Image: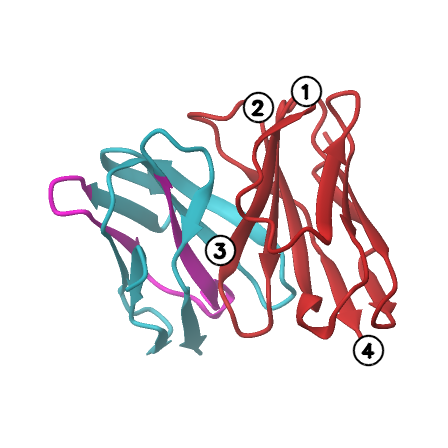
Amino acid sequence: KNEVEQSPQNLTAQEGEFITINCSYSVGISALHWLQQHPGGGIVSLFMLSSGKKKHGRLIATINIQEKHSSLHITASHPRDSAVYICAVRRQGAQKLVFGQGTRLTINP
Amino acid sequence: GAGVSQSPSNKVTEKGKDVELRCDPISGHTALYWYRQSLGQGLEFLIYFQGNSAPDKSGLPSDRFSAERTGGSVSTLTIQRTQQEDSAVYLCASSFFLIGYEQYFGPGTRLTVT
């Protein structure tokens, strides 16, 4: 079993819908990252969080340390949000990131 | 300022040849990371540097892979005697420090071994 599991693997929605992508992990962590990878391949860091909730524009990330679970929400989704969203965790006492398999999001106009 | 840059952007090489991939981190970033993304696969960690030293090389898949960093800046990932399974996108990222700072990713080098 992977240390980091994301769901769903693929998600297709209509423009304007509220999107939720989930990430569960099985190890103690010091931080969790949400990354966005567009079809061209470039990766952008969206959030880094270790507790609570962060918001940036239409994106919201939450984490529940006790339940070892994080969610990424997108409000008022738009076709330009179409990308692969990747959850990654930094284990306690380690430096490297361990990645989930990613969630491919497609927003149709 | 400039982001993380990588060169070349694409590299096609014959099986058995050596290749060098270069990463220029953001100026002032002390931590540098190499990752690999094989076709249809997720990202996997290869190695990270703090300054010029590499405390964790555990992700390097074989002794054909090596990396160095000089002057606390540019890093080179070298793959010797390339194999077809080495075909992947190799990504570099840098951060201001190891802990508590976001990583900024380069555009990657797409390596194809024929």
Closest to the camera, between mark 1 and mark 3, is 1
Q: Earlier in the sequence, mark 1 or mark 2?
A: 1
The residue wearing badge 1 is B28
Q: Pointers 4 and 3 in contact (CB under 8 A)? A: no
Shade representing chain B: red
Question: Share a chain, discs 1 and 3?
Answer: no
Q: Are marks 1 and 4 on the same chain?
A: yes
Circle 1/circle 3 CB separation < 8 Å: no
Q: Could you tell me which residue is drawn at 30 percent across and 38 percent down?
A: A54
- Disc 3: host chain: A
Look at the numbered disc 2 and give the secondary structure of its residue: loop
Kindly identify the amino acid type of the residue bearing the numbered disc 4: Thr
Which one of the lettered chains is coloured cyan? A
Q: Nearer the viewer, residue B65 or A96?
A: B65
Q: How is the image coloured?
A: by chain
Distance (Cα) linking label 4 and label 2:
37 Å
Q: Which residue is mark 4?
A: B114
Q: Indicate the position of residue A84 as horizontal and vertical percent values.
A: 47, 65
- The magenta segment: A64-90
Marks 2 & 3 on one chain: no
The residue to which callout 3 is attached is A36
